Image: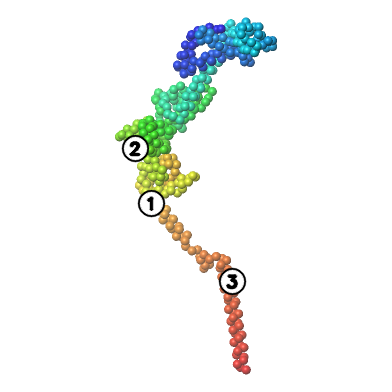
Amino acid sequence: MIKIGSALFEACEELEKERGISKEVLINSLCDAIVAAYKRQMRNKEATNIEAILDEQSGEIGVFSTKVVVDSVEDDETEIAIAVAKEIDEDVEIGDEVKIEVTPEQFGRIAAQAAKQVITQRIREAERNLVLNEFLEKKGTLTTGIIQRVENRNVIVNIGKTDAIMPQKEQIPGEYYKPGNRIRVFVLNVKETTKLPQVIVSHAHAEIVRELFELEVPEIEDGIVEIKSISREAGYRTKIAVWSNDPDVDCVGACIGPRGSRIQTIVGELKNEKIDIVRYSEDPVEYIVNALSPARVVSVDILADDEYSHEAMVVVPDDQLSLAIGREGQNVRLAHKLTNWKIDIKSVSQMEKAEAENIKNYSYDEEPEETDGFANVDEEELQEEIEEEMNQQALDEEDIQADEESTGEGEETSEE
């Protein structure tokens, strides 16, 4: 047995406090390292019956070989004679297993280096699994970190036991990320790597707005007010649709707070990003009207409402058209994302002009089309009419001829 002393256990306890790695994991790593060192020194890496045992009471560790008690030994490495086994334990019988200490008097430099590598590797694996499990639980939630540095347009944020990466597409446009500043980020994804897990965070995700409202509005946390939908263009504007499960509670007023205190806190956290709080409605017409606020709407015409498409035509006053569409189409784009409806916006004058053109086109299409003096006459019917007329003319000519002949005969008779 090798005397270790209490210093090892003290180091294990301190490492557990600093990195959160349990004492048992460290002790098991030490035992595996001793076994690896023994196999390396004895040049027998294939041995499977070798194990290290640590006695915490005495502070000693040793290497033991497990052998099966037999009557006649055929393999010295895995078997032991019954007579030899009786010297170790008098109660053993054939077929039992006994542990024989094979601890070398001293490990060589190479074996000690192998033990160090095993311990280091096990500690890294334990730390990686610890971080991975912790942030897998935090995936999809909001957390606070400290900006460390900016590398290749990526912001490195320390969020506790590891550094997270904020890609450029997850950053707010125009935002300056100063090292040392605290920042609230959304844990977007956790990727397992050979080293520490790679955590991807976002400062532009729409769920950040949801988390902030849940923190600031107790009615949302209690389930009285419900967030139905969120659409966000980070750094510019956000629309959030809310609904109250209690008719006595105003969902919009609850989110705004007394004198706007709640919404002002959220806006300050989002660096003065504009937020439109929209009242949710199951009626698509009312929901679309609310989503297009602050623009006033004259009418909403539902063009398609099925499982394949949702389309609506919205008419607004002439002076509200630019407000309804928004700068570069931002307002209608956010309304589309919020309601999941395809929205086409026209002004009153545009609709009147379009209706006048439709009436004109309709009147023109109704005029008869003349062809060779006939209006909308089928060719077959025309041919039949021509044939009937020709037959009638032929019959008339026969009748005339017959009358003339009859008249001539009568005149001849009277002369006689």
Q: Is residue 103 left or right of residue 13?
A: right
Colour scheme of the rendered structure: rainbow
- Sequence-first tag of 2 and 1: 2
Instruction: Classify 10 Å Cα crowding around label 1: few (below 14), some (14-19), many (20 and above).
Output: few
Q: Please tell me whether mark 3 or mark 1 is closer to you in this view.
A: 3
Q: Is residue 89 left or right of residue 171?
A: right
Question: Which residue appears at 45% of the width and 27% of the height?
Answer: 138
Residue to which mark 1 is pinned:
349
The image quadrant that residue 215 belongs to is top left
As measured in the structure, the alpha-carbon distance from the residue carrying label 3 to the one carrying label 2 is 85 Å
The residue type indicated by label 2 comes to Val
Q: Please tell me whether mark 2 or mark 1 is closer to you in this view.
A: 2
- On the question of residue 223 being in view, the answer is yes
Across and down, in percent, residue 148 comes to: 43, 23
Question: In this view of the protein, which residue sits in the foreground, 319 or 386?
Answer: 386
- On the question of residue 333 being in view, the answer is no
Question: Which residue appears at 61% of the width and 8% of the height?
Answer: 91
Q: How many badges with numbers are in the image? A: 3
Across and down, in percent, residue 326 comes to: 39, 42
As measured in the structure, the alpha-carbon distance from the residue carrying label 3 to the one carrying label 1 is 57 Å
Residue to which mark 2 is pinned:
249
As measured in the structure, the alpha-carbon distance from the residue carrying label 2 to the one carrying label 1 is 40 Å
Instruction: Classify 10 Å Cα crowding around label 2: few (below 14), some (14-19), many (20 and above).
Output: some
Q: Which mark is residue 387?
A: 3
